Image: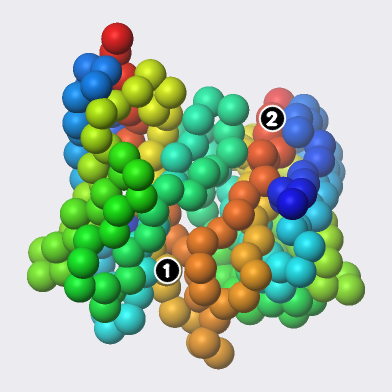
Amino acid sequence: EAGVAQSPRYKIIEKRQSVAFWCNPISGHATLYWYQQILGQGPKLLIQFQNNGVVDDSQLPKDRFSAERLKGVDSTLKIQPAKLEDSAVYLCASRPGRTGELFFGEGSRLTVL
Amino acid sequence: AQKITQTQPGMFVQEKEAVTLDCTYDTSDQSYGLFWYKQPSSGEMIFLIYQGSYDEQNATEGRYSLNFQKARKSANLVISASQLGDSAMYFCAMRGLLSGGYNKLIFGAGTRLAVHP
């Protein structure tokens, strides 16, 4: 079974530029998450989708971050404009239903200069 | 509010010895779940073990066991017979309840484990 796919693995941009990350969850997984993991910290939930609807985006900085999950399958997380403090690993995870463990991708490491 | 606390930023253990990684949590939910994940230097998060709040027995998965003390709100991970490949970051996480019956997972700050030969 294929795992959660993320791209790109690494991205370096300058502040005020924009960036987009893509995630393809495990086939059939209805729930999709984006987490931000700053170096030395635990992952922090940015947004959670159930199929193509948002169920929690309370910690998403909506002035610069946006995410969508069209057709309830893959998802894109965008940052525009990026700030230095956005340097982090962006982890995508999926889960088949409402409970159970999450399956994570390898993450997309963003460096903002 | 729900919160996970891991008070040990770093731990080290000799190969073949056992080690305990601490985790305490705070929640007002009656039903919740506790997870442990391993994050090697490559970055992926690997699920290790799960304990439900109503489970009467401590969860075990191979060399991993979870020492669940509900009254003390602690869910410590015990790794027996440590191996060099166990060197990684370890995160404790809790399933919290959102409106609509959905669940989210919140993580602690993590503990870095180093296994020495």
Which residue is outermost to the top? B117
Residue lying furthest front in this view?
B62
Chosen colour scheme: rainbow
**SS of the residue under disc 1:** strand
Determine the residue positioned at 32% across, 64% down.
B51
Q: Quadrant of the C terminus of chain B?
A: top left
Q: Residue A38, image x and y in percent?
A: 53, 39
Kindly identify the amino acid type of the residue bearing the numbered disc 2. Answer: Thr
Q: State the image coordinates of residue A90 (x, y, percent, origin top left).
A: 65, 45
Task: Determine the chain carrying the residue at label 2.
Answer: A
Task: Where is residue B102? Give x, y as percent.
Answer: 54, 81
10 Å neighbourhood of mark 2: few (<14), some, or many (≥20)?
some
Amino acid type at mark 1: Arg
Q: Nearer the viewer, residue B12 or A58?
A: B12
The residue that disc 2 covers is A111
Q: Secondary structure at mark 2?
A: strand
The residue that mark 1 highlights is: B95
